[in-house]
């Protein structure tokens, strides 16, 4: 009887492995390590981000520290040296590099960080604002196999992208943030997660960040921390060269059209993007 139970248990353990298909490639994924859903890139990606932890560049806003845990779905273990690439808009919905129809050299609220021995990448930034048609979010890519280059500043080039997604925020917390001075000048109509096209149609609920106050007595004014786990397959992906800087010309045109529909100014006197995009 004991041997029968042992054999049965062994079979059940083997059945815990499931097969996941990504395009034409299949791989085994340990139960509990299913892939984090992919979400569209949006029009404001710029493949030229600095490798750095602090991406604020002295912009005003509610302090926000974001920790991303990167897990390999092939073995449920933390991934070291994954390049986590994030970008988001400022307090009134503007993305750096795309303020006008002419591409700028600004880099605020963009950065790449390599994961440490615990598979974590931590960024110091501000709580994102929003623009018309989209709920509050941060864009993210997880890249592998690239190289760091230095010309005074450190950049990350090449390799392949194994995950493209967006990180969403609790609407109740966002409401508190939007009522603070840094964000209250945003006059765009706000979109909640429940009616955001990307959130509702691309499994945004699986990409909600876990938020906490830095100081409970101060609430949002004292700053927030956020934690999220991204489960990716590091062995597959799209070549990063296919989303290189050359693609930003088309995106700038898209940005220009959007800005004409939404003429709000940010603290730099630049127009913000609106739209059903990003």
Image (cartoon, rainbow, N blue to C red):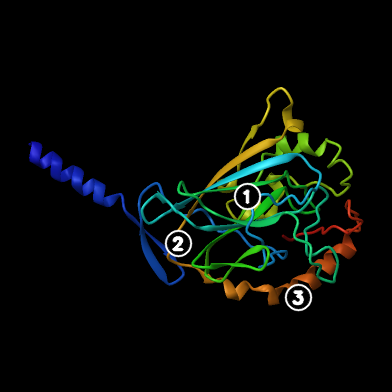
Residue at x 78% of width, y 64% of height: 97
Residue at x 64% of width, y 73% of height: 244
Point out the frontmost of discs 1 and 2: 2
The circle on residue 84 is none
Image-based side of 1 in relation to 87, left or right: left
First along the sequence among labels 1 and 3: 1
Q: CA distance from mark 2 to mark 3?
A: 29 Å
Residue at x 73% of width, y 40% of height: 63
Quadrant holding the N terminus: top left
Q: CA distance from mark 1 to mark 2?
A: 19 Å
Q: Position of residue 13 (x, y in %)?
A: 25, 47
Give the camera-side residue of 258 and 61.
Answer: 61
The circle on residue 234 is 2
- Mark 3 residue crowding within 10 angstroms, few (<14) / some (14–19) / many (20+): few
SS class, disc 3: helix
Q: Position of residue 185 (x, y in %)?
A: 89, 44
Q: Position of residue 135 (x, y in %)?
A: 73, 48
SS class, disc 1: strand
Q: Relative to 264, is 185 above or below?
A: above
* Residue position for label 3: 249
Give the camera-side residue of 152 and 30.
Answer: 152
- Mark 2 residue crowding within 10 angstroms, few (<14) / some (14–19) / many (20+): many
* Residue position for label 1: 167
Q: CA distance from mark 1 to mark 3?
A: 25 Å
Image-based side of 220 in relation to 120, left or right: right
């Amino acid at each position: 009887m004991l041997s029968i139970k042992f054999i049965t248990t062994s079979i059940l353990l083997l059945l815990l492995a499931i097969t996941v298909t990504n395009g034409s490639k299949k791989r085994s994924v340990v139960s509990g390590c299913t892939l984090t859903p992919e979400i569209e890139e949006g029009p404001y990606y710029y493949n030229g981000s600095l490798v750095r932890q602090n991406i604020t560049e002295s912009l005003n806003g509610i302090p926000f520290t974001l920790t991303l845990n990167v897990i390999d779905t092939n073995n449920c273990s933390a991934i070291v040296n994954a390049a986590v690439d994030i970008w988001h808009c400022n307090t009134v919905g503007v993305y750096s590099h795309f303020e006008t129809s002419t591409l700028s050299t600004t880099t605020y609220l963009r950065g790449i960080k390599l994961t440490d021995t615990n598979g974590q990448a931590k960024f110091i930034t501000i709580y994102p604002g929003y623009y018309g048609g989209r709920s509050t979010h941060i864009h993210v890519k997880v890249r592998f196999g690239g190289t760091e280059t230095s010309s005074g500043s450190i950049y990350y080039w090449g390799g392949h992208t194994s995950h493209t997604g967006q990180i969403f925020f609790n609407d109740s917390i966002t409401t508190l943030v939007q009522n603070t001075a840094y964000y209250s000048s945003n006059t765009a109509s706000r979109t909640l997660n429940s009616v955001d096209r990307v959130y509702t149609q691309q499994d945004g609920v699986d990409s909600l960040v876990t938020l906490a106050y830095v100081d409970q007595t101060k609430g949002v004014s004292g700053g927030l921390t956020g934690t999220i786990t991204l489960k990716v397959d590091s062995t597959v992906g799209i070549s990063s060269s296919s989303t290189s800087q050359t693609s930003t010309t088309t995106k700038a045109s898209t940005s220009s059209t959007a800005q004409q529909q939404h003429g709000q100014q940010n603290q730099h006197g630049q127009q913000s993007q609106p739209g059903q995009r990003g």
